[in-house]
Structures are given as C-alpha cells and as structure tokens.
Image: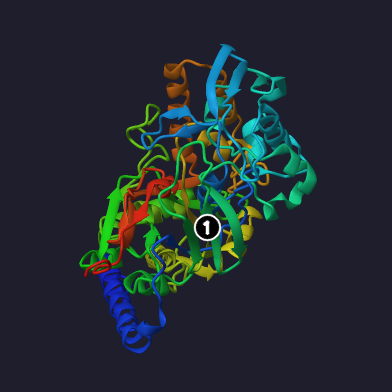
Amino acid sequence: MGKGQPISVFVVRALRATTRTLFAAIVTYACASCAGHSAPSDDELVVALGANPTDLDPRFAPDAYSDRISRLIFSTLLAREGTGRLVGHLAAAVDQPDPQTYVVTVRDDVVFHDGSPLTALDVKATYEAIRDPRLGSVKRLFLEPVESIELADDRTVIFHLKRPHAPFIQVLASIGVAPANALRRHGDDFRNHLIGSGPFRFVEQAVDEHVVLQRNDEWFGGRAGIKTIRFKIVPDATVRILEVLHGSTDLVQNDLPSHVVERLEREDHLQLSRGESSMVKYLAFNLQSKVLSDSRVRQAIAHAIDREPIIRHKLRGLASPARSFLHPESWAYEAQSRAYDHDLGRAKDLLEAAGYPQPEDGSHRFKLIYRTSMDQTSIAVATILKRQLDLVGIDMEIRTNEWGVFFADIKQGNFDLYTLTAVGVNDPDWYSFVFHSASMPPNGANRPRYSNPRVDRLLDRAKATNSQDERAELYREVQRITSEALPLLPLWYQHNVAVMAKRVQGYEVVPDGDFTPLVHTTKSAPPGEGLP
C-alpha cells in the first residue's frame, strides 16, 4: 500500500481481513469442537477476562481486573454508586468536625468471612499497612496526607490529616478493609490468604486459569444472586468469542473486539448491556526519551493520529473522542483544553521545527518502540497507529507481551509509547496520581516521568481547599497546561459493553466498568428445562 493512500481505506481493509479470519476460525471451531465445551451450571456464573488479575490484596490491587474483583471480596468504608455519588457502606457515618479531621463510625453488624467481627481496629490496621513504606503499595500516595489514625473505641476510627485534603473522602471508597489479625499473621503473604467481608468469599486463584469466588451468605448487604463466580482467564480474543458463542462463558465485559460485538448481538441466545463510560483510552509518552522529551514531537504525534476512522471502523462507534481524562459532565472539566485535530501538515511542520527533517531518500525520521499487551483489539489499534505515524515519517515498532510483562515494562519506564485505559476517574485529583512529580513509580502512575513545579503547586492547592469552585478552576488550569505539555494524550472515552447469555439476568454495566453489578446477577434455567 502506498503512503499516499487514505488511512480510512487502510482501516477498512484491515477490519475486513480481521473479520474474515476471525469468523473463519469460529466456523472451524464450531464444526470441529463445539461438543467439547460444557456450559456452566445454573449456580455458577463464568466471566471471561483477557488477562490475569495481578494481586487481589486490597492493599495493592494495582490493575483494573484486580481492583474490580477485590471489591467483591473486600468491603470499603464508602461505596460509589453508578452515578459516582458516595454512600455509606462499612461506615454507618462519616463526620468532619474540622477540615483536617474525619471521624468514621463503623457498622456493628459486619463479620469477616472467617466469622470474626469487623471493628475500627481492622480499618486502622489496613490503612496503617498501606502507609508503611516497606509494603511498597501504590496506594500509599493516597494516604500521604494522613498524619495519624486514632482508635476512639471499637466502632470509631479518627483520621487526622496533616493539612486540609478535599479528595480524602474519595479514598474511603477506594480501600477494602482486611482483618487486623490476618494481616499481622500473614504479612505480605496475605494475598494468598484473602479474608474480607464482601458479598463473595475468595476460594482460589490459578494463574492463567481462573479466580473462583463463592457467595458470602453472611454479607451485611444481603444475599448475592449467584452462588459461585468463576473469572476465567482467556487471553486470546478469538477464544473469548468462541467461549461466549458456545455457552462455556456466561459474560464478557469490554474484552471483545468492537467489530465482533455487532455480530454477537444478532445471536438469539446472547444479549448486550451497553452504556456511557468514564474510562479513557490514552497514549503515553516516555519523557525521558531523547526524541520524546521535546513537546513538539509529542504534539506532532497527536496531530498525526486520526481517531475518527478508528472509532468508526475499528471500535464500531463504541467510543467518543476525548480531550481530557475527565468526562465532559464532570464539574471540573475544561472545555478549552488543547485539542489535536488530524493534521498531517501540522505534524510534519512540528517535526521539522524539532530538528527531525524528512530524509531525502524517504526513510523514517526516527524510530519509536510501542508496547502493548496481547489483547487483539489493542494490537489492531497499534497497527493502525503505526500506519498513521508512518505517514509523517515516524517508524513505530510494535512489541507485544502478555499482560504481566507489559505492565512491568511500563512501570519500569521500558517504553517509548504505550496505550492503556484510565479507569475510575471519579475525582479530578486523579491528575495528581498521573502528573504530580511525587507520583512517579513506585509511588504512583506518573509513568511518563512528567515534572512541572507549577502543576505540582496547582494540584497541591486543589487538595487543600474544600471549595468546589476553587478546586474546579485549579484542575481546569492543570488540564490546560498538561494538554499543551502532553505527557499523556487522551484518545477516546470507551463505551462499556457486556455480552452475555440470555440466561444472565440483572446485569447492567456501570460507567466505571466495575463488577459490582455481579452481586445482583442471577441465571435462569436453560431453555426447556422444567417442561413436562
């Protein structure tokens, strides 16, 4: 294909080829081995995941899969509703007598999975463990504002802050509580002895195979609708499609190629739940790279990317362009953040200005290493991005690895470019987690290694005021600055899509893609069962 050919033609051709290959595999599988796949029992719900959750310990839970499953095992002090509103969960009440003090009253009807009562001591022990630098938890950053944690009595824990910190209330909805005795007994090995107070008990985890949870009939929130949930690890997208087609998997959420979702929606035995999302797909730049340290190069790459054909053809319209990590409906959204329209001429001018002219022989200006997981949609998007950057003279080498290796590489800074999805952007202080200079790994997710003293000051000021109007303006300024500096480029808001068997009832996707709707999910009897 010549360099002058429209990128949309490339996308469509790639899509058609992928679809033909994919459904050829499906037909072959259906003819050859359909009989070898058994459906889950009526009291077990099988959910396919594209990668292993790396650590279900609530003190860590560093990735989206880990965090979502951990929330089913461990209860938090506050819970976040689908709208983002915070409500009491383990906490019967949260009072703030002054800007630097939070008084939490713990419910008196909660027991852990081992039958022991949950008290304020367990809350203190969990939070103190995360504060211990020897643990090396990424969540320690969230608790940096805490000066001390005081036990007033068995039901009351008091958080004393070093300074006013408005986002702290969000922290209370982000950390699952574990038993103090178990944490003391097992230490770092608690991840292999998970005991929580959530709607499901941890049964076992087999790497590359599954995570099994069983209903906790003593849960203070009521009785979950299904007895057993098995999260089945299925790294290959084609296999995930086959699994849900043939009924050996009950549900797949946001883990299927978008162009296949349309095809599956036409299957009589399947159904879809879809909705808007707060999840943002983004492109990250390594600012320690000699080439990418120049913001003009990063801006050139942003202008070289054409999102519209990717969203329309590859994602099948199941996404919306993004210019911020905050959703447009957020109270702190900045509509004037710099937008990067597709403009190849502007991209080339920026590269020339940065000192990277196009060689006369037509070869590339420079080469970049792009890291991604083995997820097929991610690889397909990477392939399209490679073609788009090629049009402005940038050679992008794609390197794929299984999730654990990929995630380790990006935390260590072993990348030029990568894409990931930002999840759980519920409070604008999320920007501190990715852009504050104190948030560089292992203390946060500032993986580009971005450092800007003005941004640090703005983020610190935003934490210190309880005025939402003042916080909003400070975060808007952060968005304006970082949209120019561009350590991360927001690409699009991913829509949530769950494909599931018609037998699955009560599951509706929520904006942050959490698995909490599984608590109220049930399965009906197979068609024809119970008939005379």
Q: Nearer the viewer, residue 144 or 298?
A: 144
Q: Residue at x 59, y 44 (%)?
A: 446
Asked if one can make out residue 398 in the rendered structure from this viewpoint, the answer is: yes
Q: Say whether residue 463 is left or right of residue 329.
A: right
Q: Say whether residue 473 is left or right of residue 111.
A: left
Badge 1 crowding class, 10 Å Cα cut-off, few under 14, some 14 to 19, many 20 or more, is many
Q: Residue at x 60, y 18 (%)?
A: 102
The quarter of the picture where the C terminus appears is bottom left
The quarter of the picture where the N terminus appears is bottom left
Counting from the top left corner in percent of width and height, residue 424 is at 47, 41
Counting from the top left corner in percent of width and height, residue 391 is at 37, 65
403 lies above or below 352: below
Counting from the top left corner in percent of width and height, residue 297 is at 48, 52
365 lies above or below 122: below
Residue 254 falls in image quadrant: bottom left
Q: Amino acid at mark 1?
A: Leu
152 lies above or below 5: above
Counting from the top left corner in percent of width and height, residue 41 is at 41, 67
Q: Secondary structure at mark 1?
A: strand
> Pointer 1: what residue?
417
* Number of numbered markers: 1
397 lies above or below 454: below
Q: Residue at x 45, y 72 (%)?
A: 236
Q: Residue at x 51, y 65 (%)?
A: 373
Q: Say whether residue 484 is left or right of residue 122.
A: left
The way the protein has been coloured in the rendering is rainbow
Asked if one can make out residue 344 in the rendered structure from this viewpoint, the answer is: no
Residue farthest to the front? 532
